[in-house]
Image (cartoon, helix red, strand yellow):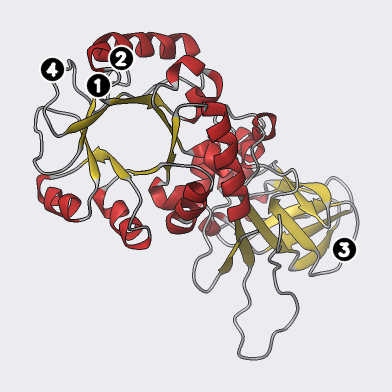
Amino acid sequence: MGARATLPTGRRGENAVVPRSLVTIDLGAVRHNARTLARVLGRSELWAVVKADGYGHGAVDVARAALEGGATALCVATVGEALPLRAAHPGARILVLGPAEDGEVALAREARLEVTVADERLPEGVPLHLKLDTGMGRWGLAELGEPGPSVVGLMTHFATADTDPAFAGEQLDRFLRATEPFAGRLARHAANSAAALVLPDARLDAARCGIALYGIDPLGEDASRFGLRPVLRWESEVAQVKRLGRGESTGYGRRFVAAEATWIGIVPVGYADGFRRDLTGTEVLVGGEPVPVVGAVSMDAIAVLLPGPRPTGTSVTLVGDGITLERHATVAGTIGYELACAIRAAPGRGARAVVDD
């Protein structure tokens, strides 16, 4: 990452608020990932999914970098998410993937948004994408009729592109059969990140890529195998070092009891910052060395097992330098999407930096 932001250490003056952690977003990595995905897609367009504030990475900044990297459209979940993007990117094509309420149609029209339709109601005066439910079992039409004049796209959404490619293939077959009469006239799009990377037949006219844009493997393994770079980095520091004697413990519930004399470090982040309670046992880096998180993760702190005494202020890498959200997600029994969306630099607690190179 170029232009690395760093967490201030030591006393910064009596009136300074000291951040307990630093979340850094690398827009150069977003741009690189967009270019990489665009190459994978070939003739298909890359539509960047920046819903949920860019999966917690900052939608406005990520959108700009994605467009610069070759994305031709932006996708969000709601009209409300789209409006700040329209203000920041007045010329961008923006598609709302979720259902728009009747009262939001006028806003969508005024903001020049494109809207997804998942039932029989067809709003007027806005470009529409008809969503066909081919197996996701959520929003979507059971059958596709004759598209009206406002329809510009036809779409579906895969339920298992990351876990069961055979079922995804069945969904794709249903979608292709239903939409074949309109091929070449209306844009057809079905692929999410997983399908875009591993199911070439699903790329069609465009692919809606979200998690891969952020350098997180949609299959939960290692995104570098696809040439993708992590966008988010999360750092803190050792705030206190303690020596536990045999039988002494750290944290709530005494979930870690020292079997022998043991050094631990206290790091001032916890589940209020997005470091989940079920991440006990995962690894972070202390001074570049991998160490396990031990004991209960609390709201404001975690404990790490040190190989020996370390000075306070020693750097702690929670995400970055090989410590990935995918690895944390495996420990927590969840997915990288959820962890990325939860990481926060809350006012008065953490700092956030955006770097671009």
Residue 85 visible from this viewpoint:
yes
Question: For mark 4, what is the residue?
Answer: 145
Q: CA distance from mark 2 to mark 4?
A: 13 Å
Q: CA distance from mark 3 to mark 1?
A: 57 Å
Residue under numbered circle 1: 132
For discs 4 and 3, the disc positioned in front in the rendered view: 4
Q: Does 326 sit above or below residue 340? A: above
Circle 1 crowding by C-alpha within 10 Å: few under 14, some 14–19, many from 20: many
N-terminal-most mark, 1 or 2: 1
User: Of the residues under marks 4 and 3, which one precedes in the sequence?
Assistant: 4
Mark 3 secondary-structure assignment: loop
Quote the CA–CA distance across marks 1 and 2.
7 Å
Q: Amino acid at mark 3?
A: Arg
Point out the tag, 2 or 4, that comes first from the N-terminus: 4
Q: Amino acid at mark 2?
A: Phe
Q: Separation of disc 4 and disc 3 at Cα?
A: 67 Å
Picture quarter with the C terminus:
bottom right
Q: Amino acid at mark 1?
A: Leu
Residue denoted by label 3: 310
* Residue situated furthest bottom in the rendering: 14
Q: Which residue is mark 2?
A: 175
Decide: marks 4, 1 in contact (CB < 8 A)? no
Instruction: Name the spot of residue 97 as percent of width and height, x first.
Output: 29, 38
Kind of element beneath mark 1: loop
Q: Which residue is at 63% across, 50% downward?
A: 296
4 or 1: mark nearer the eye: 4
> Which mark is first along the chain, 1 or 3?
1
Inspect the image, locate mark 4, and give the three-letter code of the amino acid beneath it.
Gly
- Mark nearer the N terminus (4 vs 1): 1
